[in-house]
Amino acid sequence: MVETEANLRDIEITEVAKMLACGKPALGGKTLHCENDDCLHTKTIWFTCSSRACSRCGKKATDNWIVQQVERLPNCPWMHMTFTMPDVFWPLFLHNRQLLDKLSQLAVDNLLYAAKQQGLEIGIFCALHTFGRRLTWHPHVHVSVTLGGMNGHGDWKALAYCHGKIEKRWRHRLCDLLLSEYGTLNIEDTESHCRDFDELRRFVNRQRQRFWHVHFAKKTQHPKATINYLGRYIKRPPIAGAKLAHYRGEANLSFRYLDHHTGKYETEEVSQLELIRRLIQHRFCRKIILKYK
């Protein structure tokens, strides 16, 4: 993979190397001996990698993280929201990863603005997510927010978010971000519609007039369901190891995924290198924001 792909980042090479060595002598280990001096039985346990790319280590980290967060978050009604963008914007964020951090902040500021109008301090839990069911590049932001907050007197007040206003503000703020960052953008040759600022502005403003979906899920009475949901995105690898258990070294491999458009499970076959490329572009660009009193 390293020999055939010149654009790999150092962190990608390091983390994948750790993952491949997980549970093997390369990472070292410890040998257990029986307390009975006459017993010659020993057992060697090889160290795991603790890499974010590893399916085995990622599952354990997810379970531990969920337990810790449930104890931290306020026990009150919550709502989960998903902030998306038009797919034509995805390549700009793929080649300008520094903008991914700002995506999360835009989503958070959107809700803080709504709460400020009511004079309330709210709780927000935010996670950047970069892949879809097929492991292809699909940046979007998952946000869980309290359905209420504390006013200046320390009293809890319920708060309902206006779906239309949240979507409109998200759409305009993200478009403004892209235009404001024009001087620093890395624009690939394939993005021929963004060759100069005027073309970028026309391109962005066309998307500004489109419908952008911000999904409001059903409210929950306790943060546990939200934490379980987000934990799968934040800590676990993009694909479960169980889905690849049948692989026996062939040139290609397949995996199943749920197609949201059809509501049915589909199977996709890719080469070894293609699957690795899809995996490493996601595991090392997640961001978590916790904000609450």
Image (cartoon, rainbow, N blue to C red):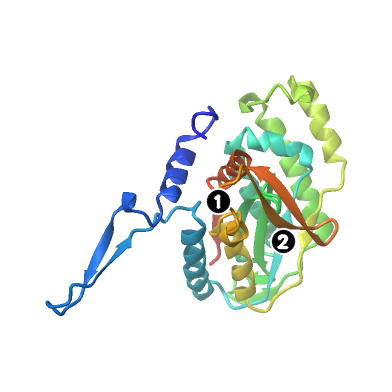
Q: Residue at x 45, y 45 (%)?
A: 15
The residue lying furthest to the top in this view is: 196
Q: Residue at x 61, y 42 (%)?
A: 251
- Where residue 156 sits: x, y (%)? 64, 76
The image position of residue 103, as x and y in percent, is 65, 46
Residue under pointer 2:
81
The residue that mark 1 highlights is 287
The location of residue 131, given as percent across then percent down, is 66, 49
The kind of residue on which mark 2 rests is Met
Amino acid type, label 1: Lys
Q: Is residue 44 left or right of residue 116?
A: left
Q: Residues within 10 Å of mark 2 (few under 14, many from 20)?
A: some
Residue 196: image quadrant is top right
Compared to residue 115, the image places residue 52 above or below, namely above
Q: Is residue 181 left or right of residue 86?
A: left
Q: Secondary structure at mark 1?
A: loop
Question: How far across and how far down the image is residue 118, in percent?
Answer: 71, 65
Q: Residue at x 50, y 51 (%)?
A: 53
Where disc 2 sits, the SS reads strand
Of 266 and 245, the residue lying toward us = 245
